[in-house]
Amino acid sequence: MNSFLIGLNEIILNLKFHIWELIYYICMRVIAKKTLKEYFEKNAESKQPLLIWFKEVNSGKWRNHNEMKETFSSLSILPNERIVFNIKGNKYRIVVKVNFDYQIIWIRFVGTHAEYDKIDATKI
């Protein structure tokens, strides 16, 4: 019976490893595109740069901040798993919270540089 349980435990551990491998190969999932849409509906000139950012992030696969910084050299890494993206020559900023293990990005803020200066990006 012990050898059966040991074998079963090895199978479970092996499956967990493969599940994490599969998660890595899934592209980033951005939550919530609605936040971007609400912003660019009020600020029409932001639409194209925000959609370009969305498309690039939504198709990306990164394991950590450093890999993401290779794609977006101007991003800033903040405490509390926050990242700030500079959009359209720093005219707009997007603050996100990232979970690299699950390949999820939560949009926490979209706005102009001036609007960004009024918030605490580490807490939103």
Image: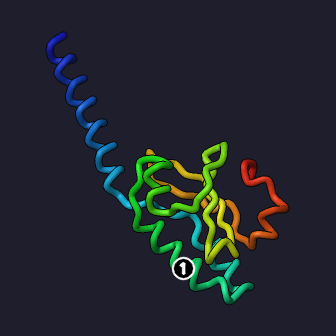
Q: For mark 1, what is the residue?
A: 51
Vertical placement of residue 89 versus 31, above or below: below
Location of the N terminus (image quadrant): top left
Instruction: Give the structural element (helix, strand or loop) at label 1.
Output: helix
Vertical placement of residue 10 versus 76, above or below: above
* Left or right, residue 96 beside residue 10: right
Pick whichever, 17 or 40, lies toward us. Answer: 40
Mark 1, other Cα within 10 Å: few <14 / some 14–19 / many ≥20: some
Who's the residue at 70% across and 78% down the image?
39
**Residue lying furthest top:** 2
Amino acid at the residue labelled 1: Leu
**Residue lying furthest right:** 118
Pick whichever, 112 or 103, lies toward us. Answer: 112
Vertical placement of residue 52 versus 14, above or below: below
Who's the residue at 66% across and 43% down the image?
79
* Left or right, residue 63 beside residue 36: left
Who's the residue at 67% across and 60% down the image?
108
Q: Position of residue 41 (x, y in %)?
A: 69, 86
Q: Position of residue 23 (x, y in %)?
A: 35, 50
Q: Position of residue 72 (x, y in %)?
A: 50, 63
Who's the residue at 81% across and 70% down the image?
114
Location of the C terminus (image quadrant): bottom right
Q: Quadrant of residue 51?
A: bottom right
